[in-house]
Image (spheres, grey):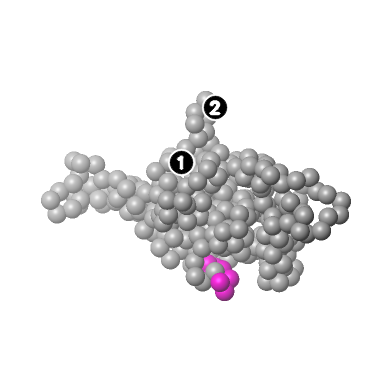
Amino acid sequence: MQPVVTVGLDGSPESLAAARWAAEEAGRRKLTLRLLHAWPMLAPEPARVPAEVDQNYWAKRLVDTVQAELRARHPGLDIGKSLVADDAQHALLQAASESEMVVLGSRGLESVESYFLGDVSMPVVARAERPVVLVRAEPRDEEGPATAAGRVVVALKLHGSSDGLLDFAFHTAAARDVPVLAVHGRSVPLHARTPWGVDHGFSEEATRDAHEQVSRALRPWREKYPRVEVADSIRLESPAKAVVRAAEGASLLVVGRRRHRTGLAPHLGPVAQAAVHHGRCPVVVVPHD
């Protein structure tokens, strides 16, 4: 099967922003874009029926309208469409297994009725075996995505493999010709806290140790992508807070999620939770072992 970028469409402004982002990314990666709309009530495709009695008319119109816009913006991009008679969560998880990435719209925590906080996006992010990108709608989306100029921020935990995260981050940065910022947050233990802040000796030692570990983790990727400018940021604060702050003004935030073990309910760690709920830029959650 040809590699694809799949975007889920539900008719919301956020899903349109996601489709525009996905089209840009598919073009950079030279991949096919797949527009997916899932609805359990879709009827089997009739041979020939007029629009006024076609049960699938509005679903087709939704996908066709987005496809027409994206083809006008990206005339060289291969854009396919898929209407699936299934619930959105199951359809998107199936699509994730067949795609390089899945892109969804997100409202973060701005609304109780958030698409992201509903029954669709959270399970997809927590269960998908491939990266899932969450894109928020912004006023600038009316004129098309304006996310290519900022750096790519990647959250490094330094325990376990970060290859999947760094591969995604560096590949994206190279395609966009933007720098990578690797962020590592380290909480300060109580014994190192003082009335005026953090103990100076602890601060120096912890920062030096973390910087050495981050440098080792980045070395192979600096060599693989010599044209990508790379910087790191060591912050003595909670990793979740460090990552969200570092992502201000970024074009993309890359965070990880451990693949769930058999018998355990899938979930996101605190850094991924903070990123997808509070990050203003597009956020990609990359599963890893």
* Total numbered labels placed on residues in the image: 2
Q: Is residue 86 visible?
A: yes
Q: Amino acid at mark 1?
A: Leu
Q: Is residue 161 visible?
A: no
Instruction: Quickly name the residue at label 2.
Output: 262
- Seen from the viewer's position, the closer of residues 260 and 117 is 117
Residue 283 screen position, x and y as percent: 50, 55
Q: What is the span of residues highlighted in magenta in the rendered image?
A: 142-148
Q: Secondary structure at mark 2?
A: loop
Q: Residue at x 50, y 46 (%)?
A: 118
Residue 239 lies in the magenta-colored region: no
Residue 147 lies in the magenta-colored region: yes
Q: Which one is earlier in the sequence, the residue at label 1 or at label 2?
A: 2
Residue 162 screen position, x and y as percent: 50, 45
Q: Which mark is residue 92?
A: none
Q: Residue at x 18, y 41 (%)?
A: 191
